[in-house]
Image (cartoon, rainbow, N blue to C red):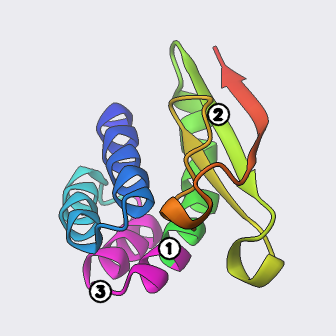
Amino acid sequence: MTCKIFHNYQQIRSALTNLDASAVVTAAVNLVESLSEGSPEMKSMALAMANTDDIEKQRGRFSQFTQKVEPLFKESITGGAIYKQFCPMAFNNMGGYWLSDVSEIKNPYYGEKMLKCGKVTETIEK
């Protein structure tokens, strides 16, 4: 199940990077379906992403979801690497984290405007 959640999460990250709000909605609906009944808070956050086509609201909800799902990904990784990445300018310079399956920065909070803004702050490996 965690593998599906990670896959759905990456689809959302990619859709945000590409400024594709409808793809975010589709991936968020898939994420809701992947989350178990034991994750009501995460499920609610994913549903909130699915219920809007406002890319800025989706980005905010994605950032909140990232904070909640990171421990799950950290404890369930069985191979490979997850890259915790950070953009200091996101959300009016409050900064925002995201998790990626590649080390290359592709900023989901700014898309093409500042695609490479950010850095890897942690590499999570098993």
Amino acid found under the numbered disc labelled 3:
Thr
| Residue 18 placement, left or right of 68 | left
Give the x, y percent position of residue 111.
Answer: 50, 62
The numbered mark at residue 52 is: 3
Mark yes or no: residue 109 visible: no
Identify which residue, 31 or 36, lies in the foreground: 31
Mark found first going from the N terminus, 1 or 3: 3
- As helix, strand or loop, the secondary structure at mark 2 comes to strand
- Return the residue at label 1: 59
Residue type beneath disc 1? Arg
Provide the residue span drawn in magenta: 39-60
Marks 3/2: CA–CA distance: 27 Å
Q: Is residue 80 above or below residue 86?
A: above
Q: Is residue 124 visible?
A: yes
Badge 3 or badge 2: first in the primary sequence: 3
Q: Nearer the viewer, residue 103 or 74?
A: 103
Dot 3 and dot 2 residues touching (CB under 8 Å): no
Q: Is residue 52 magenta?
A: yes
Q: Quadrant of residue 10?
A: top left
- Which quadrant: the C terminus? top right
Residue in the picture at 37% in, 59% down: 18
Using the rendered view, name the quadrant where residue 28 is placed.
Answer: bottom left
Q: CA distance from mark 1 to mark 2?
A: 18 Å
Determine whether the residue tagged by mark 3 lies in a helix, strand or loop.
Answer: loop
Image location of residue 52, percent across then percent down: 29, 86
